[in-house]
Image (tube, rainbow, N blue to C red):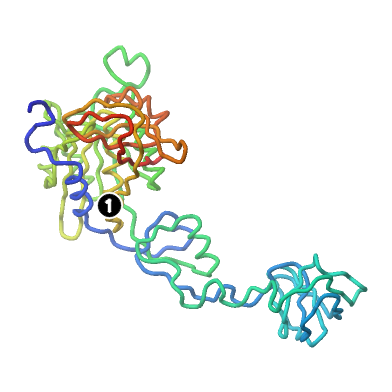
Amino acid sequence: MSGCGAEKGLISIDEALTLMRSTPQTLMTETLPLGECLNRYLAQDVFSPVDLPSFSQSAVDGYALHTTAEQLQDSVFHVIGEIKAGSDAEHRLLDGQAIRIFTGGKVPEGTTHVARQEIVAIESDQKIRLVEHIKPQADIRFTGEEVQLGQTLAEVDQKINIGGLAALSMAGVQQLNVFKIPKVAVVITGDEVAETPDDLKAGKVFDANGPLLKAWFKDYGLEVEILHIADEASLVTQCFERLKQQFDVIITTGGVSVGDYDFVRPCAFETGFEQIFWKVKQKPGKPLFFAEYKHNLHHCYLLGLPGNPAAVYVSMQVYGKVLLDALQNQRQDIQWFNGILTHDLKSDARERFLRMHAYFEHGQLKLKSLTKQQSHMLSNLMQANCLVRIPANEMLEAGRELSGLFIIS
């Protein structure tokens, strides 16, 4: 077998993912106010400091009642007051008494039922009559029926999403112990970036990698520093020397292959980085480079991406996310989905990540490949919503089940 798929030294996608997942040293933890913890990963279990509800309360607008009668339809009650949500319930109900109460209001001592106002007929200012029968304890939210004091609300490694943040806030949680988020620097290498349309005539191209990575990290939830460095070894070395001390991760684009101006690897070695792997048997993104710098307790990881924008995009969706998650103690396998290919596909010597459009049809997830898959092309990302793994050296027919990954927006 010949061709780039048979090149010696290439590791598989799964081998690369395993190294990316297992190598990083988990970052330290920090305690933050709850409102600053959206999309952060918990470093400690969270226990409820209160019962929820913290007091028995009305589930409806209506009347709290006290009665020993078994049949309540047409029963008449004497109204002795009113309780709004947030007010103290100082009243004690006796048999035959009622009190006007609103949703969330604390039910007074002696309450046996709460009657929603739709089944209450007002006889006078101080008398009501029930027009329907209700069961004991109707429409009362009892203390601790949702959550009890000391109950586990969230566990280590759980991601705090919007719903989780709201649930913890309702329970009175004020702060959380979470893993620190990585400090990331992005280095765009190359001399070919065009500033204006006129620059295209001089053989330059517009920068897609800078905006792509800035948007990707914003979607992930990180602010990053983006630098542009010319293809000069001394400048790349100086850049790495500075960044390795200040950041947890350096992401580079371009300069990781074997060309005369590919300085990322030699400059990384010169500044103390040790190679974890280089070159993956995949398409796009074969010359992917992963290295680690260690000094005392500080670790910095360098993820060198090829310069072609599709390779940058695919590599960040697959490897970039795995690296950033691992630094926050998230080391589980990627959760691939399964879908049905809707057309035939030619074989390739390397395993591929193809940009596809996934959609449901008759209860099945279908996969449609998009045109213009070359590593320098991005236009199909306007339609793509997933990356699909295509096995190497196989002709695929329509109906084949494949594994895919829904991509960060």
Label total for image: 1
Q: Which residue lies furthest to the top in this view?
A: 201
Residue at the spot x=85%, y=78% of the render?
Answer: 75
Residue at the spot x=36%, y=32% of the render?
Answer: 356
Indicate the position of residue 50 as horizontal and vertical percent values.
53, 76
Indicate the position of residue 219 as horizontal and vertical percent values.
41, 43
Q: Is residue 82 left or right of residue 256?
A: right
Q: Is residue 313 left or right of residue 40?
A: left
How many residues crowd around disc 1 within 10 Å: few (fewer than 14), some, or many (20 or more)?
A: few
Q: In this view of the protein, which residue sits in the foreground, 254 or 238?
A: 254
Kindly identify which residue carries mark 1: 333
Q: Residue furthest right?
A: 124
User: Measured along the vertical axis of the image, is residue 288 above or below residue 116?
Assistant: above
Indicate the position of residue 152 as horizontal and vertical percent values.
43, 72
To which quarter of the image does residue 329 belong?
bottom left
Indicate the position of residue 53 as horizontal and vertical percent values.
59, 73
Q: In this view of the protein, which residue sits in the foreground, 366 or 356?
A: 366
User: Measured along the vertical axis of the image, is residue 49 above or below residue 34?
Assistant: below
Residue at the spot x=75%, y=86% of the render?
Answer: 92
To which quarter of the image does residue 140 belong?
bottom right
User: Measured along the vertical axis of the image, is residue 157 above or below residue 17?
Assistant: below
Secondary structure beneath dot 1 equals loop
Quadrant of the drawing holding the N terminus: top left
Quadrant of the drawing holding the C terminus: top left
To which quarter of the image does residue 390 belong?
top left
Q: Which amino acid does label 1 sit on?
A: Asp
User: Measured along the vertical axis of the image, is residue 388 above or below residue 327?
Assistant: above
